[in-house]
C-alpha cells in the first residue's frame, strides 16, 4: 500500500499534486510519503507484537535523517554498516541501544566509534574481525557485545548481487565452523557473546528461504546453550521483498507468522533488519522529459534523471514502473527506452517500455524508488545529486537540498605547484 494515487488525471502524493512540487523545486527529485513510511513501519512492527523484538531499519536502503528520525520516534532502531551510517543514526536520535553494526570490513576507527557510542552489538563476520574488535575493546577497557553472523548456505532465490547467505558469499561465517568460532570468542577477554546473526539476501519474495535459514540457526543456538553460552539476541536480518512489477511477496503478517513459529520458544529478543519493505514503495523519483529521439532501430525518451540518480536499472536490470504525473486521454503509445543524459550506453531507467508518447516538459514518475535510490546515487559526469522531498498531508518539506556546482568541488584544491 502506498499514497501515490491519481486524483482525476493528476498523480498525487498524499494531498499534494506531484506536478506542483516539480514546479517549485525543479527536477529531478526524490519524493517520499510520510503516511506510507509510517504505515509500513507500523505494520511490520506490529506483525511481531507477540514476541520480544527490535526493528532495526537497514540504513543502506535509505539513510536520510528525516526518515531515521521518523522510525526512531516509532520505536525503531538502526542496522548500520559503516561509521558514516552510525553517525547519521545517532544524529537522527536513534538510541545507541537499538543500533546493530554489520558489514565485512569494519575498521579499527569504526569499532572505536561504535564502542564509545555503546551500541547494542556488533554482528561479527570473520575471525580476524573478532580478534581486532577484542584488541580495540581492550585498549578502551570495555567489552564488546557481539553476535556472530552465520552463513547458513541458503539460496534466497534473488539477484546474485544481493544474495548473501550462500556458501560462496563473502558474508558471515560458515555454519559448519560456527561452534569453533564461538569458542574462540569465549576465550577473548574483551568480547561478550550475546547473540547470533543471519542475513541471507535482499528482495526475497518467498518465506521458505527465511525459514530454512532460521531452522539451522535455532539448532545452533540450542547447541551453544548446551555449551554454556548465553544467547539473548537472535538477529534474523532483513531482505523481505516488495512488488516492483509482478512479484508477490508475503505481507508482513504472513512473514512474521512463519518466523515466529520457528523462534517463539527460544527466549531470545528477535532483531529484525527491514529496509526495502519499509521504504521501497514509499518513495518515487520525479523526472522531466527533455527530448524524444527516434532512430531506424529504436525510440528514446530522454529525461533529466540518469543512472547517477537511480542506478538500479543499470546495475541490476531492475524494473521500475513509470507513470505520467498528468494523464492525458487519447495519447498514442510507443515502445521506448527511457534514458538519461549520462554518457554511458547503460544509462537507462527503462528499456522497451510501452507507454504514452510524452512531449518535452512533461513529468514522469519512477515508482518504487524509495529504497537504494538516493543512497546509491553519485556525482558521475559531475552531476549534482537531486533533492529529497517529503510530503505529509497537504504540505511538503525539503529534507535534503539539491546539490550545487559548488558542492561538486567542495574539498578539492589545486596545489600552488601546479
Image (spheres, rainbow, N blue to C red):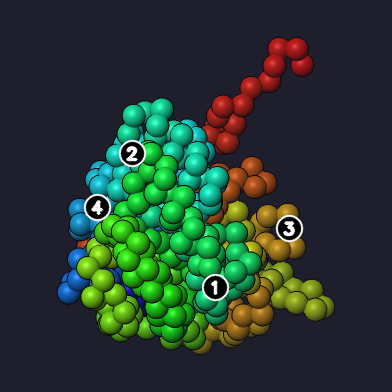
Quadrant of the image containing the C terminus = top right
The span from disc 1 to disc 3 (Cα, nearest Å) is 36 Å
Residue 200 seen from this side: yes
Which x, y percent locates residue 20?
36, 60
Pointer 4 local density, CA inside 10 Å: few below 14, some 14–19, many at least 20: many
Give the label, 4 or 2, closer to the camera.
Answer: 2
The span from disc 4 to disc 1 (Cα, nearest Å) is 33 Å
| Label annotation for residue 72 | 4
Q: Earlier in the sequence, mark 1 or mark 3?
A: 1
| Label annotation for residue 186 | none
Q: Earlier in the sequence, mark 2 or mark 3?
A: 2
Pointer 1 local density, CA inside 10 Å: few below 14, some 14–19, many at least 20: many
In the displayed orientation, state which residue is furthest to the top.
Answer: 416
Which x, y percent locates residue 5?
34, 76
Relative depth, front residue between 392 and 317: 317
The span from disc 4 to disc 3 (Cα, nearest Å) is 39 Å
The residue that label 3 is drawn on is: 344
Amino acid at each position: 500500500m502506498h499514497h501515490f494515487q491519481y486524483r482525476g488525471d493528476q498523480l498525487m502524493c498524499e494531498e499534494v499534486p506531484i506536478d506542483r512540487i516539480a514546479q517549485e523545486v525543479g527536477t529531478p527529485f526524490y519524493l517520499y510519503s510520510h503516511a506510507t513510511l509510517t504505515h509500513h513501519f507500523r505494520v511490520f512492527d506490529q506483525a511481531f507484537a507477540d514476541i520480544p523484538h527490535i526493528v532495526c531499519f537497514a540504513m543502506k536502503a535509505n539513510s536520510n535523517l528525516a526518515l531515521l528520525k521518523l522510525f526512531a520516534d516509532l520505536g525503531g532502531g538502526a542496522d548500520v554498516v559503516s561509521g558514516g551510517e552510525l553517525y547519521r543514526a545517532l544524529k537522527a536520535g536513534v538510541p545507541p541501544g537499538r543500533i546493530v553494526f554489520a558489514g565485512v570490513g569494519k575498521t579499527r576507527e569504526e569499532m572505536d566509534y561504535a564502542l564509545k557510542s555503546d551500541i547494542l552489538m556488533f554482528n561479527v563476520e570473520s575471525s580476524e574481525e573478532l580478534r581486532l574488535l577484542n584488541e580495540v575493546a581492550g585498549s578502551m577497557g570495555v567489552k564488546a557485545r557481539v553476535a556472530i553472523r552465520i552463513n547458513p548456505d541458503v539460496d534466497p532465490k534473488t539477484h546474485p548481487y544481493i544474495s548473501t547467505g550462500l556458501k560462496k558469499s563473502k558474508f558471515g561465517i560458515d555454519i559448519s565452523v560456527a561452534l569453533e568460532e564461538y569458542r574462540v570468542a569465549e576465550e577473548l577477554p574483551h568480547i561478550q557473546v550475546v547473540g547470533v546473526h543471519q542475513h541471507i539476501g535482499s528482495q526475497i519474495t518467498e518465506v521458505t528461504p527465511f525459514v530454512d535459514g532460521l531452522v539451522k540457526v535455532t539448532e545452533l543456538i540450542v547447541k551453544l546453550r548446551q555449551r554454556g553460552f548465553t544467547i539473548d539476541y537472535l538477529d534474523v536480518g532483513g531482505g523481505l521483498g516488495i512488488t516492483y512489477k509482478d512479484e508477490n511477496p508475503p505481507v508482513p503478517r504472513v512473514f512474521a507468522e512463519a518466523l515466529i513459529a520457528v523462534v517463539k520458544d527460544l527466549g531470545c529478543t528477535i532483531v529484525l533488519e527491514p529496509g526495502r519493505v519499509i521504504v521501497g514503495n514509499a518513495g518515487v523519483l520525479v523526472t522531466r522529459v527533455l527530448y524524444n529521439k527516434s532512430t531506424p532501430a529504436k525510440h528514446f525518451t530522454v529525461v533529466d534523471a540518469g543512472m547517477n540518480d537511480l542506478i538500479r536499472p543499470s546495475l541490476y536490470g531492475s524494473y521500475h514502473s513509470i507513470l505520467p504525473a498528468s494523464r492525458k486521454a487519447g495519447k498514442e503509445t510507443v515502445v521506448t527506452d527511457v534514458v538519461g543524459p549520462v554518457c554511458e550506453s547503460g544509462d537507462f531507467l527503462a528499456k522497451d517500455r510501452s507507454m504514452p508518447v510524452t512531449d518535452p516538459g512533461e513529468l514522469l514518475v519512477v515508482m518504487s524508488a524509495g529504497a537504494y535510490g538516493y543512497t546509491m546515487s553519485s556525482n558521475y559526469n559531475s552531476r549534482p545529486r537531486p533533492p529529497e522531498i517529503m510530503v505529509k498531508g497537504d504540505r511538503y518539506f525539503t529534507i535534503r537540498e539539491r546539490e550545487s556546482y559548488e558542492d561538486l568541488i567542495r574539498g578539492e584544491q589545486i596545489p600552488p605547484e601546479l
